[in-house]
Amino acid sequence: MKLDEILVNNQTDIINESFTSLQRSHLKHYDTSRADENWQRLAKLFDLTLNGVKTKSLVDMVTYSEKIAKERYESGFDLHEVHSAYNVLEETIWKTIIKEIDSADLAESLGLISTILGTGKESLALTYVSLSGKQRVNSLNLSELFRGK
């Protein structure tokens, strides 16, 4: 079965499990939001992930992540809170893929999901940093982390 079919067939379970994980995280702003709002947020993120799988395009994920970063930043959400929503969805999708996909397609499928959601998380972080520093950031330079110093 193809990745997009697996996602479509498991959509409700993936969103529900992600929602449960998000609730268990007890993140300040998600705890004070209505449950249906949080579920819809995860559903939208899922839809964008599925769209990225189908189209092999990251444009919609980047646009959405930048928009959400601005909205959540202005609403007082910490970056960690919003980033966690992406993470719980990614983790749940990974579990589903591992259970359902042929082993020959596993690496490509996990890589595709990680690329789509990873790009969303990067766009989210870059927008937050830009907003908090009131300056435009084109990328994060993390090279010092990998020098072993």
Image (spheres, rainbow, N blue to C red):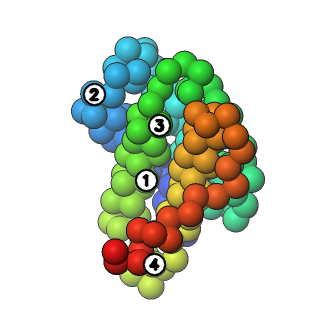
Would residue 16 be visible to someone looking at this image? no
Between 56 and 81, the residue placed more toward the observer is 81
The answer to whether mark 2 and mark 3 are in CB contact below 8 A is no
For the point 33% across and 66% down, the residue is: 99
For disc 3, the marked residue is 79
Q: Mark on residue 90?
A: 1
Distance between the Cα atoms at labels 3 and 4? 29 Å
- Residue 107, label in figure: 4
Q: Is residue 136 left or right of residue 37?
A: right
Label 2 secondary element: loop
Residue at mark 3 to residue at mark 1: CA–CA distance: 17 Å
Disc number for residue 26: 2
Q: Earlier in the sequence, mark 2 or mark 4?
A: 2
Q: Farthest residue toward the left? A: 24
Of the numbered discs in the image, which one, if any, rests on residue 37? none
In three-dimensional space, the C-alpha distance between marks 2 and 4, rounded to whole angstroms, equals 32 Å
Mark 2 is surrounded, within 10 Å at the Cα level, by few (under 14), some (14 to 19) or many (20 or more) other residues, namely few
Q: Nearer the viewer, residue 148 or 81?
A: 148
Q: Of the residues tagged 2 and 1, which is closer to the observer?
A: 2
| Residue 148 or residue 4, whichever sits in front | 148
